[in-house]
Image (tube, grey):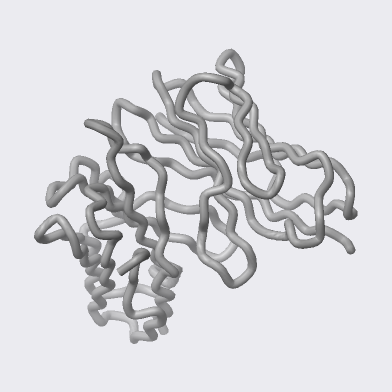
Amino acid sequence: AQSVSQHNHHVILSEAASLELGCNYSYGGTVNLFWYVQYPGQHLQLLLKYFSGDPLVKGIKGFEAEFIKSKFSFNLRKPSVQWSDTAEYFCAVMYSSASKIIFGSGTRLSIRP
Amino acid sequence: GAGVSQSPSNKVTEKGKDVELRCDPISGHTALYWYRQSLGQGLEFLIYFQGNSAPDKSGLPSDRFSAERTGGSVSTLTIQRTQQEDSAVYLCASSGRDGRSNTGELFFGEGSRLTVL
């Protein structure tokens, strides 16, 4: 079955620390990959996306993600987090065979000022 | 409108009542998705529309749940005989096309928070 796993449920970091959030998906052929962010009290918004080409993609607010096809992974990274990055982060996968978009369970990121 | 609009934003209902949740997608977006977000949970896929048809209804939890889309635009999610476990935020998102393919980039509404007493 098609599935997306985010193994970190809650991550707590201090400001300026580096961040890496894991995302793995089950095999299902060609995929489009996404990270969405939900800031407190706000609706979900796109952080970055990968369709094809360079597997290292850059998004808003200094975030980046790397698609590693052999590992079925699309981990999110940021070299130095800020307090304003406190939010919930969701990885999502669209399997081209289905157009259904499946989300991971989310990772809550808390940043200590 | 400029974004995805959902109504009502909040709905409190008694167990056993029916509820309807509405989603007005971004104009021109052909794909429309419904998700459910429960406290502490991720986004649970419910149903996906391409135009007026629903190629994938696999996520609907039970036959109490149904959805339709008319005119390739507005969608309504109906929950019959609501139960307490239906309490959640119901999110709608729409997506456009790039050529012949759905891009998969979702634009979300604010959600409809349903509380079943």
Residue B78 sits in quarter = bottom left
Residue drawn at 84 percent across, 41 percent down: A18
Of residue A50 and residue B99, the one placed in the foreground of this image is B99
Quadrant location of the C terminus of chain B in the rendered image:
bottom left
Q: Quadrant of residue A31?
A: top left
Vertical position of residue A106 compared to residue B116: above or below: above
Asked if residue A70 is positioned above or below residue A90 in the image, the reply reads above
Image coordinates of residue A37 in percent, x first then y, are 59, 53
At a point 29% along the width and 32% down the height, the residue shown is A98
Image coordinates of residue A35 in percent, x first then y, are 56, 43
Q: Position of residue B87 (x, y in %)?
A: 43, 72
Q: Is residue B20 above or below residue B71?
A: below
| Residue B97 vs residue B58, the one in the foreground | B97
Q: Residue at x 37, y 83 (%)?
A: B11
In the image as oriented, which residue stretches furthest toward the left?
A: B71
Residue B71 at what x, y percent from top left?
Answer: 9, 59
Quadrant of the image containing the N terminus of chain B: bottom left
Q: As drawn, is B33 to the left or to the right of A94?
A: left
